[in-house]
Image (spheres, rainbow, N blue to C red):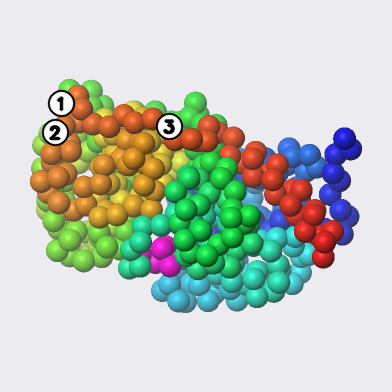
């Protein structure tokens, strides 16, 4: 059978990244596109939604991502301002390049903004990591997910429940493809390159004695507005984490938003300097090493729920809901919310030798990006020929 050739008049796939989680998802996709038969041409657009060097530039190096072809440089702002600025700057990119489609990943503001521009211009939109739902409309990410899925042409899912969500919302089954989790593609390909916690602590000028603790150490990340933007909520969480730190030392990778609010609300006194090691934002390989060797991860990050499940590390999620239920049903994730008793009980259970070890979900095998490339290339060629 003669392999398909990429039509000379069919433009590139415009691949959009904007914030840290997007980079981990896009890296394996770009590699898979480059090695597909035929190779799928791409144009990588970085919206600049995350602009801190530690949270953006460095991750391109860690993930061996090519430098973006276009950087929109939109920076920070309210959700409305940021979404509008991405749309305003992204439209000329599509005008100047004959895009075969717009490919977006995840659920950040850039995902929705670029989706809307593509749809309005009649360009097919492909959403990777479609169909995830927390059913909490207070989360900006939930709004981004729902709206993106409603107008996308092709939807790639990470777990079976995502397709059921989409079908309930009126999406046609033929638009949906279950391919697995590209975030796990990145984890599997980079695990051997992960930096050791000792090296990470040394680079930050921190004592690594905690690594020899009887119970090891816990890794903490907090960044969601619902957890860090209100003084009483952040105070309660820090007080509980201080109690956890009395049981095992904690390495706390501080998001800039969280660090700023700790200072703003005058909560520095809740940080146990001997038992809670504060780090600046870390690169992907540093975080991967810290996760891999942790006894427990306490987080409000969706991505870390997935990564800990893939690594077999117990995870306590400091949220009331999750858009990744498979990490609870099959994986290592336990939802504890902000409840002090639930958090402390979860930690005690893990330190006593319990905690969920789970199993790796279906198709989280490191080949999701290859399945996307194998499906998308022929789909785009057929779509082009039909139109």
Q: Measure the alpha-carbon separation of dots 2 and 1.
A: 6 Å
Which residue is at the front of the view, 296 or 381? 381
Residues shaded magenta: 139-143
Q: Decide which of tag 1 and tag 3 comes sooner along the chain.
A: 1
Q: Are marks 2 and 1 in contact (CB under 8 Å)?
A: yes
Q: Which residue is mark 3?
A: 360
Is label 1 in a helix, a strand or a loop?
loop
Percent coordinates x, y for residue 321 in the rendering: 29, 54
Of marks 1 and 3, the one in the foreground: 3
Residue at point 33%, 63% (across, down): 136
Residue at point 44%, 35% (across, down): 361
- Mark 3: few, some, or many residues within 10 Å (few <14, many ≥20)? some
Q: Which residue is mark 1?
A: 352
Q: Measure the alpha-carbon separation of dots 2 and 3.
A: 24 Å
Q: Decide which of tag 2 and tag 3 comes sooner along the chain.
A: 2
For the N terminus, the image quarter is top right
Is label 3 in a helix, a strand or a loop?
loop
Residue at point 20%, 41% (across, down): 276
Q: Is residue 194 above or below residue 160?
A: above
Percent coordinates x, y for residue 270 in the rendering: 13, 51
Q: Is residue 374 above or below residue 383?
A: above
Which residue is at the front of the view, 353 or 227? 353
Residue 191 appears in the figure: yes
**Membership of 158 in magenta stretch:** no
């Amino acid at each position: 059978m003669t392999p398909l050739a990429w039509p000379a008049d069919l433009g590139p796939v415009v691949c959009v990244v904007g914030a840290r989680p997007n980079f981990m998802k896009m890296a394996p996709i770009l590699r898979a596109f480059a090695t597909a038969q035929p190779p799928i041409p791409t144009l990588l657009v970085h919206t600049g939604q995350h602009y801190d060097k530690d949270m953006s530039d460095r991750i391109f190096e860690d993930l061996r991502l090519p430098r973006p072809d276009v950087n929109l440089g939109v920076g920070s702002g309210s959700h409305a301002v940021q979404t509008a600025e991405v749309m305003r700057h992204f439209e000329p990119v599509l005008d100047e390049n004959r895009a075969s489609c717009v490919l977006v990943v995840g659920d950040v503001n850039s995902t929705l903004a670029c989706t809307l521009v593509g749809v309005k211009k009649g360009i097919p939109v492909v959403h990777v990591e479609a169909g995830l739902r927390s059913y909490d409309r207070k989360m900006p990410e939930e709004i981004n997910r729902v709206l993106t899925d409603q107008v996308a042409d092709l939807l790639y899912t990470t777990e079976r429940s995502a397709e059921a969500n989409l079908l309930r919302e009126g999406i046609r089954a033929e638009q949906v493809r279950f391919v697995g989790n590209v975030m796990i593609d990145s984890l599997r390909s980079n695990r051997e390159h992960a930096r050791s916690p000792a090296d990470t602590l040394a680079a930050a000028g921190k004592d690594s004695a905690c690594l020899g603790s009887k119970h090891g150490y816990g890794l903490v990340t907090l960044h969601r507005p619902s957890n860090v933007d209100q003084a009483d909520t952040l105070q309660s969480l820090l007080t509980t984490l201080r109690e956890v730190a009395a049981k095992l030392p904690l390495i706390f990778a501080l998001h800039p938003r969280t660090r700023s609010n700790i200072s703003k609300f005058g909560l520095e006194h809740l940080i146990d300097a001997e038992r809670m090691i504060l780090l600046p934002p870390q690169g992907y390989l540093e975080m991967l090493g810290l996760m891999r060797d942790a006894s427990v991860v306490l987080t409000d990050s969706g991505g870390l729920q997935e990564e800990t499940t893939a690594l077999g590390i117990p995870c306590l999620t400091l949220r009331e809901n999750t858009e990744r239920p498979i990490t609870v049903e099959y994986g290592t994730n336990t939802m504890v919310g902000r409840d002090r008793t639930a958090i402390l009980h979860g930690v005690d259970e893990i330190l006593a030798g319990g905690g969920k070890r789970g199993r790796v979900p279906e198709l989280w095998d490191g080949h999701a990006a290859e399945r996307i490339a194998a499906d998308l290339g022929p789909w785009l060629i057929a779509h082009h020929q039909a139109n």
